[in-house]
Amino acid sequence: MKTSSATDLYYSLWYYSLHRSSIGLRMQQHRRRRATPKTAEDCFGEVLRELRKDLGVTQEDLEFKSGYHPTYIGQLERGQKSPSLRAIMRIAGALNAQGSELIRRVETHLGLAHVRSRLPKVP
């Protein structure tokens, strides 16, 4: 039987039983959060933030150079929005990078580098 540590427990005022319900103080275990798999949007946001910080560019500079609204840039970096091809190219241009470099880094974060090696070579 698993023993619980003090950090896994919280207090609940409601205690229900099969025979009656009553109000009392009872310790219950916290529900575990499920680990959500990383999405492409999450990885793009991480790559965008890393590249921007490595180049010493602020969000405000990126917003001005790319022409996108500050809220949109923030949403991209948090993985809440999925960028279009046009957005990827404009943001890459604002960072003096290539769009393919951003995508390559996203693939690396996702662990999809092996997928690229199986694709047919384009002359």
Image (spheres, helix red, strand yellow):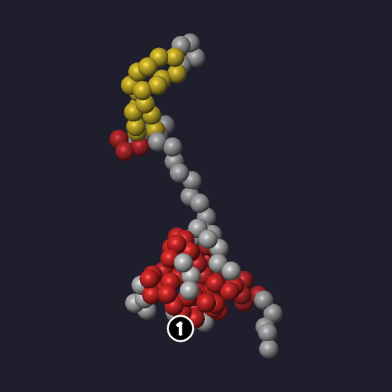
Quadrant of the snapshot with the N terminus? top left
Quadrant of the snapshot with the C terminus? bottom right
Disc 1 residue crowd, few under 14, some 14–19, many 20+, Cα 10 Å:
few
Q: With respect to residue 60, does 10 lie above or below?
A: above
Q: Percent position (x, y) of residue 39?
A: 54, 59
Residue closest to the far bottom: 123
Residue closest to the far left: 6
Q: Percent position (x, y) of residue 89?
A: 55, 77
Element type where label 1 sits in the image: loop
* Residue closer to the observer: 29 or 69: 69
Residue closest to the far top: 19
Q: Amino acid at mark 1?
A: Asn
Relative side of 82 to 17, left or right: right
| Residue corresponding to mark 1 | 96
Residue 90, visible in the rendered structure: yes
Q: With respect to residue 48, does 20 lie above or below?
A: above
Residue 77, visible in the rendered structure: no
Image quadrant assignment for residue 88: bottom right
Image quadrant assignment for residue 63: bottom left
* Residue drawn where x is 46% and y is 11% of the image: 20
* Residue closer to the observer: 18 or 53: 53
* Residue closer to the observer: 67 or 91: 67
* Residue drawn where x is 34% and y is 32% of the image: 10
Q: Percent position (x, y) of residue 41?
A: 53, 62
Image quadrant assignment for residue 13: top left
